[in-house]
Image (cartoon, rainbow, N blue to C red):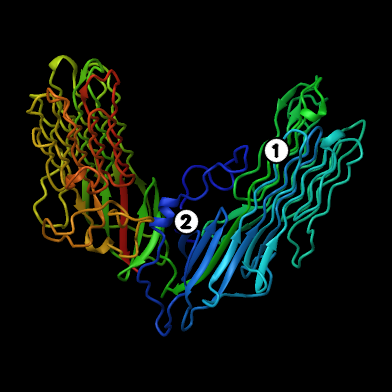
Amino acid sequence: MGYLGRRIGKSQDTGNATADGTGAGILDLFTNGYFQRQGNVFNAPGLSGTALVATGGVISDYADGPTVYRAHIFTSTGTFTVTTAATGFLPNNVEYLVVAGGGCGGGYAGGGGGAGGFRTNVVGHPLASPSPFPVSTSPGSYTVTVGSGGAGSVGSFTSGNPSWFGIVGVSTITSAGGGNGGGAGYSNGPGRTGGSGGGGASYGSYLTGYAGNTPPTSPPQGNPGGNGTDAPLYRTGGGGGAGGAGGNGTPTVSGNGGIGTSITITGITTHYAGGGGGVGPSGGPSPTAYQGLGGLGGGGNGGSQDAGGALNTAGTHATFATGGGGGGIVSQSGTDSNTSAGGNGGSGIVVVRYQIAQLTAAQKATGGAISYYGGKTIHTFTSSGTFATEPNWTSATVEYVVIGGGGGGGGTGDGGSYSDAGGGGGAGAYRTGTTPIGAHPVSTSIQVGAGGAGAFATPNTGDGVTGTSSFFGPPITSPGGGGGATGAAAGTPNSGAPGASGGGGAREPASGGPATGSPFPGTIGATPTSGWGHAGGASTGPQGAGGGGGAGGAGQNDPGNGRGGLGMQLPTTFRNPTFVAPGSGPARGFGGAGPTSPPFSGADTSGSFWFAGGGGSGGDYGGGGSTTASAGGGGPAVGTPYAGAGDGSPSPGNGSPARENTGSGGGGGGGGTGSPTKVAGGSGGSGIVIIAYPS
């Protein structure tokens, strides 16, 4: 299974929601909006057609064997809009996943919350509806509603909210919210039915679990919650899940949440709609002895008490964007039951996917964000991972770009009656070429270097931090850029740090950091093993600072504004024109913006795909409080930096951070008069590793 849908932070199966039912990262918008758009995919011989074109949600393209899909992933309400119908062999039917919000866990001695309803028509899934879902351009707008999870606030317990996809009066798919768990007495009382039902309480009138698949659908969208048990055991029931009923309370444990069900519609196999666990009441030999666990698929764990009745573990919230049920909770010993609150249900998710191409063969390697352009498969790593060839691998070599993390910008001086500008951070090494991949199948470690932190100035210390190395297997390594110098107090010069490209110096006379990279020869092509890099700019004027070095040129000296060194454009193999940044402005494509008049041989006029620029220096003190700052990456002016590098700040102010995954340097902090505030430099951009080979 190959995939484009990369994640940052915790996965869907492990990240917890916040108290309001949001929280916990699921899909990184930058990665999915930026990298996961299909370029020129070459269909298998004899197959002709153009794919359906649509907008909405977070877009993720991925290959499942030789079939290439595009998924639109909605974790909040939006619109799926079809602008162009498919032609030829490619379908105008879409596959969907619609998961509703989960119910909250029951309060005082409460059962687990039921999962949100789960509905899909993905062929081969055990819960799939056999009905296709055709879409068209007339009308072409399909409403997507993502249900929120039920809130378990004090004295109020709510079911999850429904999710749906379609056009009212034409065709809609609706999943019902999960029912909340039952509680014992007062306003914590009854649970509810739903997509999956809530679990029963441990005593009182609400012991019986609540029905799932309400309203009924075929195939069923969920299952019932488990039953609780009254005195002398006091065990609660787990909430129902899409893949199974909630567990009943037993003499040994409260009920676990019903298991969810897995699906690979986003490109990553993920469980959804697990039920919440029932609370473990007091009397156990340990705090978690009788605690019911959340079902796989985002369900929250039940809370627990020790033998003395004191609250030890609160019921947990369900996971964001899974439709899981919340865990049941107990009140603290000696408090009224109305002070109890159940764990929140998880919000739902809606995914719509369709086929966009058929490759001539199954995917030949895995790892990173995979796209297709110009007859080649491209793997883009924005975080560390593994590039692994498959048994059907055929290419003798791969083409690569490896860029180290950029250096952080320098800060200001002593923060007293005046402060001196900080130097710009240097860029990480830019290295490109071809290499044999070795015996097959083979796995190669990928490291994406972190950008260096910007300085936070203290007297004579606190320079920008050097970035860390990126590598494609340790033999192909690109070191990080040097940190920019902080404007020192009491007239002390401070040189920039060495690196792949050096950081800018601060307070004259101070030199820029030397570069371990080799000077750019003037034409984009294979680099030496050191990669391309240049020295940082020097400080030769009063209280000024130099720009950080870039892959395409040295940092500029001060006076002269200390502009960051020019970055570098990617080789033509990697310039997929469909990689367009979300939003507007000059920064088109992944990486950063660049000049539209080619500054050297091999560059184009797109103004896209620029990396590894030096950070600009801050505005200097200059005896009169100058507010002149410097552009990063060789940009023409502050506010229009090239290569995603950080601009320097006017006086006084923090330097701008570099854009992530550009390997560019951070901007220097701005100095000035009359400011006691210490000023920080901008952080360097993390690096990137990109690999290409014939599809």
Residue at position x 39%, y 66% from top? 38
The front one of 163 and 601 is 163
Tag 2 secondary structure: loop
Q: Amino acid at mark 1?
A: Gly
Residue 310 x, y percent position in the rendering: 76, 21
Tag 1 secondary structure: loop
Q: Is residue 544 left or right of residue 646?
A: left
**Can you identify the residue that label 2 sits on?**
5
**Can you identify the residue that label 1 sits on?**
343
Is 617 situated above or below 371?
above
Q: Which image quadrant is residue 494 in? A: top left
Q: Is residue 450 left or right of residue 24?
A: left
Q: Which image quadrant is residue 257 in? A: top right
Which quadrant, please, contains the C terminus?
A: bottom left
Q: Is residue 64 visible?
A: no
- Disc on the earlier residue, 2 or 1: 2
Gap between marks 2 and 1, in whole Å? Answer: 29 Å
Picture disc at residue 396: none
Residue at position x 32%, y 42% from top? 686
Does the residue at mark 2 contact the one at mark 1 (Cβ under 8 Å)? no
Q: Is residue 47 left or right of residue 614?
A: right
Residue 498 x, y percent position in the rendering: 17, 32
The front one of 233 and 678 is 678
Q: Amino acid at mark 2?
A: Gly
Q: Residues within 10 Å of mark 2 (few under 14, many from 20)?
A: many
Q: Is residue 661 visible?
A: yes
The front one of 679 and 650 is 650
Residue 568 x, y percent position in the rendering: 19, 51
